Amino acid sequence: MRATWEPHEKSGRLTSQSDLPDSVYAFPKQRKEPLTDASHVRNAIARLDQVEDVSAAERELAFANIRKAAAHYDVELTETSAKDVGVHPQSAANKRKRTAARS
């Protein structure tokens, strides 16, 4: 899958998420998981399997975007595909079950 991510450099601070172009997101269509610095790249890979309402192809695109951003920001990834991260989105029902189990 070909990555669509492009680095976004803007002078000054971004005032809101709406200031970012779609090309800066791991999931550009949904505008989920911005990849604006190394910290955001690490966060996006950690949450890749938690993003809901995306197809397998969108998840693969997101991984390609994360990999490209990781190379740009010098973040080392041990994962080689989205399947290495997992493709088990957390449903609201599963979250409630885990929360109830901890109580």
Image (cartoon, rainbow, N blue to C red):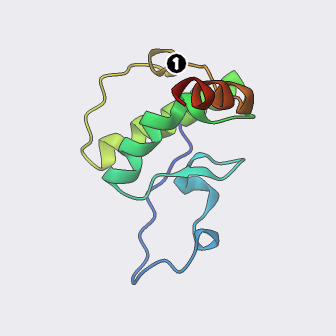
Q: Residue at x 46, y 21 (%)?
A: 85
Residue 60, given in percent of the width and then of the height, sits at 58, 26
Would residue 8 be found to the left or right of residue 37 on screen? right
Relative to 77, 58 lies left or right: right
Q: Is residue 90 visible?
A: no
Q: Secondary structure at mark 1?
A: loop
| Identity of the residue furthest to the front in this view | 103
Q: Position of residue 23 (x, y in %)?
A: 58, 54
Q: The N terminus is located in which quarter? A: top right
Label 1 CA crowd tier, 10 Å (few <14, some 14–19, many 20+): few
Where 63 falls versus 70 (above or below)?
A: above
Q: Which residue is under mark 1?
A: 86
Q: Outermost residue, top direction? A: 83
| Residue drawn at point x = 57 percent, y = 23 percent | 101
Residue situated furthest bottom in the rendering: 12
Q: Amino acid at mark 1?
A: Gly
Camera-side residue of 39 and 60? 39
